[in-house]
Structures are given as structure tokens and as C-alpha cells.
Image: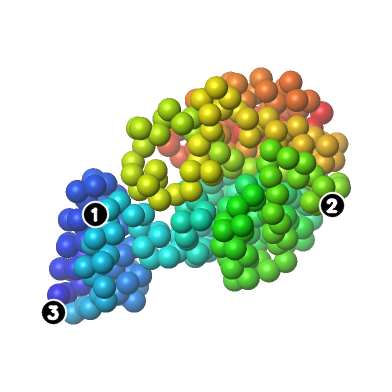
Amino acid sequence: MATRRDMFHLLRGVASELYGEAEGAQIAEMLLLSKGGITRNELLVEPNKEIVINGLEDIIRELRAWRPVQYIIGTASFDGMDLEAGEGALIPRPETEELVEWIASEVKQDSTIVDVCTGSGCIALALRRRLAKSRVWGIDISAEALSIARRNAQNYAPDVELVEGDALGDFAQLVDRGVDVVVSNPPYIPKSDRVAMRRNVTDYEPSIALFVEDDDPLLFYRSIARTAHTMLNRGGKLYFEIYENFARAMEDMLKAEGYDNIVVREDFRGKQRMICAERR
């Protein structure tokens, strides 16, 4: 029977072949803690204790097939929550946590917030938990994503209102008027960039939530900004997670759509990945 240390080294070796040593170690630890039913402290304090992981061969097979570790263990950590992770919704990213932090630091506790392209519900739920008196909607076109979001909401913020709607349509009719904040992490990766991406993303995460046509990469941003302008209170704010190459184009578009006080922020990697604008 293998020890915890042995199992960690085995999983790290498999994961590192695909992701490199540093990320491979993180993936191995996530798998060991989740599938082994232990805490990180238990792993560190008693590394030589024996451990059994049921379905180990299947886990290794899935790893080698590039299946994301969050889908293997069924959860993804986000802003203090362990959210359900399934192939119908994007896996929440650390840079999106930074967007949540930015919004929560700037808006009122009793804000009315609409999260467009909510996916797993990560942004909507995190903001509802951070802003004690807020009212929050999450909108998504995918029924599968909304099912995941609703299960996550039951665990963390049951009063978030999750509704089916199209970011390219008139989603304003789905929520009450008088909105303080519209936020979105919409599809924004040009399809031509797909060839440079890793298989753990392209083979498993929903393409509908990732990719846009090369000839109009701001399609979702423009549509959301235009509809948000009809919903937001005067001085209301629009926040986006953006593709790092689009910051200047986003500023120009938002100005053309009637927004002022536009601010771009970098993420923890130094990439321009967030933007905020106020309704003029």
C-alpha cells in the first residue's frame, strides 16, 4: 500500500508531464486531498501514513487525457467557496477573483447587480456574499450552466436570481430597472487563438463560453455595454473581464457607447485583464 508521499509523487509525475513541475505539483495536491479525503496539514504532518485512492487508474487516465483537475474532482475553489465544476460551465479563474475584489471595494453594500454570462455563478455568488444588502441576478444562455449555477447558489447564496437569457439579446427585460452594476466575463478569445491553447481548455470547457469570431472579437462586449446603458442608473458602473490584447479597443468602444471614467486594471500576472466604466 502506498504512503501519502508516494501517492503525491506518482500524481505529480503524471501531471508534470503535461503541465510542468510547478503546476503539476498543485494538481497532484488537489487530487490527493480531494480523492484521499485528507487535509493539507495532514499531508504535511504525516506524509508516511498509508492512503488508498479509489479509482486511481481512472484518475490517471483522465489526467493523461488532459481532463481538467477541477472536472476530475468535481469542484473549483473561488473566493472562499468550493463550487461545483462541470463541463457545462467554465472553470473559475484567479483573475476573476480579482475582478470580484475590485467591484466589492468600490460599490455600495445595497447595490443591485447583474452578472451577464454567469456560467457557474461564481461572480454573482461571490458578490452577493461580499455585499450584505445587495440584490444580484445571474444571466446565461446555457441551461446546463444555469443548472450548475443554481446548485452552487443553494450552497452559498440562495437568493441570487438566476435566469436564462442571451447576452446578445435584450436581457434588460429579465431584471428590474434601476441597476447599479453590470458585470460580465463573456466569450472573448478569437477562434484563431485556439490552436495555441492547451487541451485541458479546448477539449473540455464549453466553446460557447470561450470563443468569438476573429472578425468581431468585441461582439459580446459591445452588445452587453449597449443593453447595460439602458439598465444602469446614472453613474452606474459596468465591469468586464477582458482579453489582454483588447484593452485599447475596449476603451474606444465604451466611449462610443456612452461611458466615461474608464479604468483598465492589470491582473496578478501584469496583464490588462479588467475594465470599468461609468454610464455617462
- Identity, as a three-letter code, of the amino acid under mark 3: Met
Q: Secondary structure at mark 1?
A: helix
Q: Residues within 10 Å of mark 1 (few under 14, many from 20)?
A: few
Q: Which residue is mark 2?
A: 176
Mark 2 touching mark 1, by CB under 8 A?
no
Quadrant of res 103: top right
Sequence-first tag of 3 and 1: 3
Quarter placement of the N terminus? bottom left
Furthest-left residue in this view: 1
User: What is the tally of numbered marks visible in this picture?
Assistant: 3
Left or right, 105 with respect to 148, comes to right
Q: Is residue 70 above or below residue 223?
A: below
Residue ID at (46%, 40%): 268
Q: Residues within 10 Å of mark 2 (few under 14, many from 20)?
A: few
Checking the image for residue 1, the label placed there is 3
Quadrant of res 233: top right
x, y percent for residue 205: 44, 49
> Of the residues tagged 3 and 1, which is closer to the observer?
1
